[in-house]
Amino acid sequence: FSVETELRRAIEAEQLSLAFQPLIDLQSGRLTGFEALARWQHEHRGAISPAEFIPVAEESGLIVPLGRWAAGAAATALATWDRAAGRELPLSVSVNVSAIQIARDDVGGVIEQALSASGIDGSRLTIELTESAIINDPQRAGRVLAAIKDLRARIAMDDFGTGYSNLAYLQKLPIDILKIDRTFVAPMLRDRDSLAIVRAVLSLADALGMSTTAEGVESPELAQTLAALGCATGQGYHFAKPLGQDAAFAYWMARE
Ligand code: G
Ligand code: G
Ligand code: NA
Ligand code: MN
């Protein structure tokens, strides 16, 4: 069978899962939330990387049901952790939303549904978009982002600095967080140009009143330098790899 056929079946049979990568407040060292990342454990082929199946999902349109499932499962995971802890945890969960979903689906409705089904407050959800979600139809993107903001969710620009769009959308759209791509972060201690780009993004975010998350934080030196430069949040192998749902809860418990 083709990957597409198998992916359709996997979505229908709920054979996908989410991994959760910790997001760390670089000033305090505290866990503030997790990014939810789709995982596909194939019965015969083993783990299939999202780098392989997300593009297939986008080309085939399967990203629409996959994205609906991911939003629901991420909100449900947060509700499950709350129940296990016996209280509402001070944690958020970030969900990736593809440009194709923005173009074809009612993403505001999808998020609303995920929140009401789980009972999670919208303020505990972050939607991660790439610049490609905006450039094709900025007006439509504007309406979708406004609907997401009405639900009190936050919006992060993923892979910031790697896309092709102009910067005007940062002024016009309700963006809360810039996620600095790991291709700039990982080499910044040995590559002056990467460091210059990271500094420029931090300064831009500060001037526009946005928060920042650095991806690809792979060493304590990177975490320290980013903290000193004023970056709010870090994500990367130095803190943790993406974790299964139970391991993510254990990670929270161990740090408290
Ligand atoms: O999890 P990493 O391990 O390998 O993810 C690879 C890529 O797949 C990243 O660009 C990530 O944003 C994307 N990705 C992972 N899960 C999802 C998802 O649920 N939806 C979308 N649209 N992209 C995802
Ligand atoms: O595009 P997106 O930012 O959503 O990508 C998330 C991807 O980055 C996931 O595949 C995740 O496994 C990977 N990732 C997370 N932390 C690190 C890191 O510190 N180094 C590297 N090389 N990859 C990372
Ligand atoms: Na992401
Ligand atoms: Mn990213």
Image: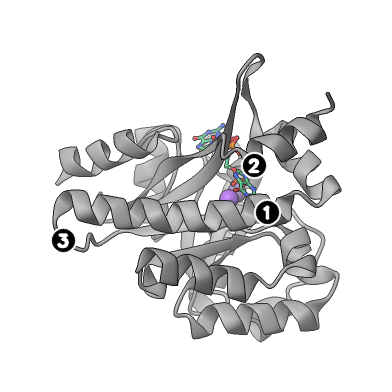
| Whether residue 187 can be seen here | no
User: In this figure, which residue is indicated by the disc labeled 2?
Assistant: 11
Q: Dot 1: what SS?
A: helix
* Residue 62 on image: x %, y %: 75, 49
Amino acid on which disc 2 is placed: Ile
Q: Residue 169 at what x, y percent from top left?
A: 72, 78
Residue at x 21% of width, y 63% of height:
88
Q: Residue at x 63, y 54 (%)?
A: 67
- How far apart in space, not on screen, are marks 1 and 3 (Cα)? 31 Å
Check whether the beta carbons of the residues at disc 2 and disc 3 lie within 8 A of each other: no
Q: Which residue is mark 3?
A: 87
Most extreme residue toward the top is 44
Task: Using the image, determine if residue 141 lies above or below residue 189.
Answer: below
Disc with the residue nearer the chain's start (2 vs 3): 2
Q: Earlier in the sequence, mark 2 or mark 1?
A: 2
Apparent side of residue 107 relative to residue 104 in the rendered image (left or right): left
